[in-house]
């Protein structure tokens, strides 16, 4: 068994792929880049901040087609300013949308 030093229910998986997100029910997606993903959360970068507590719909399209795309409903937990006028946005995954 792999040790989990952070005492999390799900381990984080580092990712490097593009994503798009929008407010739930919104129509104008904003681009971003996924940093890591787990069974219950996501961390990504974007040039547009999102207020904590907001609900967003995130669509991840992996670089390689062997991994299917993912659309999730996410509650924004934290949004912090980073370098190069980007924001790191952390969220809790509240549901998965069936893309079929």
Image: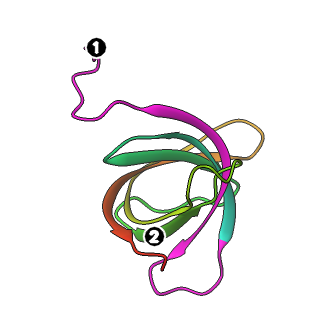
Seen at 65% across and 61% down, the residue is: 48
**Residue 42 horizontal/vertical position (percent):** 44, 47
Seen at 67% across and 54% down, the residue is: 65
Instruction: Name the one closer to the observer, 97 or 25.
Output: 97
SS for callout 2: strand
Residue furthest to the front in view is 66
In primary-sequence order, the first of circles 2 and 1 is: 1
**Residue 35 horizontal/vertical position (percent):** 58, 39
User: Can you identify the residue that label 1 sits on?
Assistant: 5
- Judged by depth in the image, the label closer to the viewer, 2 or 1, is 1
SS for callout 1: loop
User: Which image quarter is the N terminus in?
Assistant: top left
Instruction: Name the one closer to the observer, 70 or 18.
Output: 70
User: Can you identify the residue that label 2 sits on?
Assistant: 56
- Residue 57's place in the image compared with 70, above or below, is below
Dominant secondary-structure state across the stretch colored magenta: loop
**Residue 50 horizontal/vertical position (percent):** 52, 62
Q: Which residues are magenta?
A: 1-29
Residue 22 is a magenta residue = yes
Residue 94 is a magenta residue = no
Tell me if mark 1 has few (under 14), some (14-19) or many (20+) residues whose alpha carbon lies within 10 angstroms of its own.
few
Instruction: Name the one closer to the observer, 32 or 62.
Output: 62
Q: Is residue 71 left or right of residue 49?
A: left
- Residue 18's place in the image compared with 71, above or below, is above
């Amino acid at each position: 068994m792999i040790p989990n030093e952070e005492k999390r229910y799900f381990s984080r998986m580092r990712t490097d792929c593009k994503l798009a997100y929008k407010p739930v029910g919104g129509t104008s997606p904003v681009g971003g880049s996924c940093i890591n993903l787990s069974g219950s959360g996501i961390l990504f970068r974007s040039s547009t901040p999102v207020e904590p507590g907001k609900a967003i719909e995130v669509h991840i399209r992996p670089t390689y087609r062997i991994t299917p795309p993912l659309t999730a409903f996410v509650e924004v937990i934290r949004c912090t300013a980073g370098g190069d006028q980007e924001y790191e946005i952390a969220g809790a995954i509240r549901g998965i949308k069936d893309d079929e």
